[in-house]
Image (cartoon, rainbow, N blue to C red):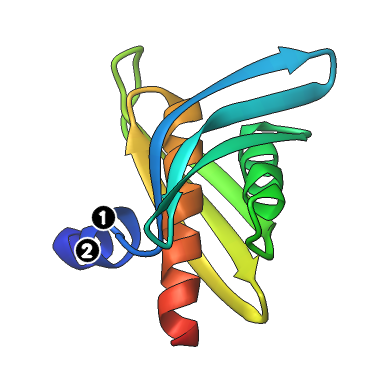
């Protein structure tokens, strides 16, 4: 069952591949900067939002993708400081909706990884 989830929601490749990224917080505003390959073209990203995933999708919109977050959830896989986290993001890309997931020992990284997984699933579903 996990292998199905991993291939369908975690290890999703497609039109958006995040190359490098960083975030910072200025008061209540989160800033996302980075580089992504979008449809084969390397693009600089810069966005802001109420959290890192929202700032990431703002940066993708600035790069020309019509994308927004509809839902977000996260949890630890086990107890303790070394636990991995999984984040789930439901995105709308154009008129298509899809869930994606990210996994990491750092919840911030898990949440950022979930965004391109959802975007790529939505783009693939839209054909």
- Circle 2 is placed at which residue position? 7
- Circle 1 is placed at which residue position? 11
Query: In this rendering, would 15 be left or right of 44?
Result: left
Instruction: Give the residue at x 48% y 61%.
Output: 118
Instruction: Give the residue at x 29% y 67%.
Output: 8
- Residue most extreme to the front: 41
Position above or below: 2 against 44: below
* Rendering quarter of residue 47: top right
As rendered, which of 114 and 73 lies closer to the eye?
A: 114
Query: In this rendering, would 2 be left or right of 75?
Result: left
Q: Specify the label residue 68 is tagged with.
A: none
Structural crowding at the residue carrying mark 2, measured as other residues with C-alpha within 10 Å and reported as few (<14), some (14–19) or many (≥20): few
Instruction: Give the residue at x 44% y 83%.
Output: 125
Which quadrant holds the N terminus?
bottom left
As rendered, which of 91 and 15 lies closer to the eye?
A: 15
Describe the element under mark 1 as helix, strand or loop: loop
What is the x, y in percent for residue 62? 71, 49
Which quadrant holds the C terminus?
bottom left
Instruction: Give the residue at x 59% y 21%.
Output: 23
Describe the element under mark 2 as helix, strand or loop: helix
What is the x, y in percent for residue 123? 48, 74
What is the x, y in percent for residue 28? 84, 21
Position above or below: 100 against 4: above
Position above or below: 8 against 46: below
What is the x, y in percent for residue 109? 43, 30
């Amino acid at each position: 069952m996990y292998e199905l989830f991993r291939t369908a929601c975690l290890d999703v490749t497609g039109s958006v591949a995040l190359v490098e990224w960083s975030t910072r917080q200025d008061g209540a505003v989160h800033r996302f900067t980075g580089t992504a390959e979008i449809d084969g073209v390397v693009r600089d990203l810069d966005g802001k939002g109420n959290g890192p995933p929202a700032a990431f999708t703002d940066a993708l919109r600035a790069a020309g993708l019509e994308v927004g977050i509809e839902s977000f959830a996260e949890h630890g896989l086990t107890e303790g400081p070394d636990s991995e986290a999984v984040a789930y993001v439901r995105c709308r890309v154009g008129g298509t909706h899809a869930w994606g997931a990210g996994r990491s020992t750092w919840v911030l990284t898990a949440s950022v990884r979930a965004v391109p997984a959802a975007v790529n699933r939505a783009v693939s579903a839209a054909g």
